[in-house]
Image (cartoon, grey):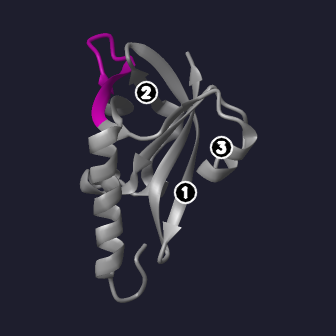
Amino acid sequence: MYGSRGPKLEQLNALRDTQQHCREYGMRVTFKLRVETEVGRDKYNSINRSVGETAIPIYTFPFEMQPNTKQLERAGIFEQHEAVAWTPARSWQDRDFDFESIDITRMTVVIDGVTYEVAEKGRSSQFLGVYLYWTFGLRRR
């Protein structure tokens, strides 16, 4: 992620500044990740599983509704979506997520009480080999 010798101070400062900028000017949204917690058998010996949900509050800035093609390209998103959420990469990394480990097929986002499905993810704003934002293309549920 950072190269062969670890992160540079400039990269860490850029990631931190982006996160602080989003906290100061952005809006708080909740990403909900669905995870299977246990697979077992019930008293009738049939297989059942319990599905848990992890809520991750993250600030997003900017949050764009009805983005045009230029805004989507800048966000690293290639399909048309109802909205694009720009989240700081540092906020995910602080929670021990990396870009590849985020499974968008089971992810939703709650913004002001409205639930969106995450349809696509991308990266944007590269600085010294590090992406500062992880972007998500959203569709209404």
Q: Earlier in the sequence, mark 1 or mark 2?
A: 2
Quadrant in which the N terminus appears: bottom left
Residue 57 seen by the camera: yes
- In screen coordinates, is 128 left or right of 7? right
Question: Which residue, given by chain and number where applicable, does mark 3 sit on?
Answer: 71
Q: Looking at the picture, which amino acid does disc 3 mark? A: Gln
The quadrant in which residue 138 appears is top right
Q: Which residues are magenta?
A: 40-57
- In screen coordinates, is 58 left or right of 116? left
Residue 83 - label: none
- In this rendering, the count of numbered labels is 3
Residue 7 seen by the camera: no
How far from the left and from the top, in percent, is residue 6?
Answer: 32, 83
How far from the left and from the top, in percent, is residue 37?
Answer: 29, 32
Residue 53 lies in magenta, yes or no?
yes
Gap in angstroms between the C-alphas marked 1 and 2: 19 Å
Mark toward the viewer: 1 or 2: 1
How far from the left and from the top, in percent, is residue 46?
Answer: 38, 17
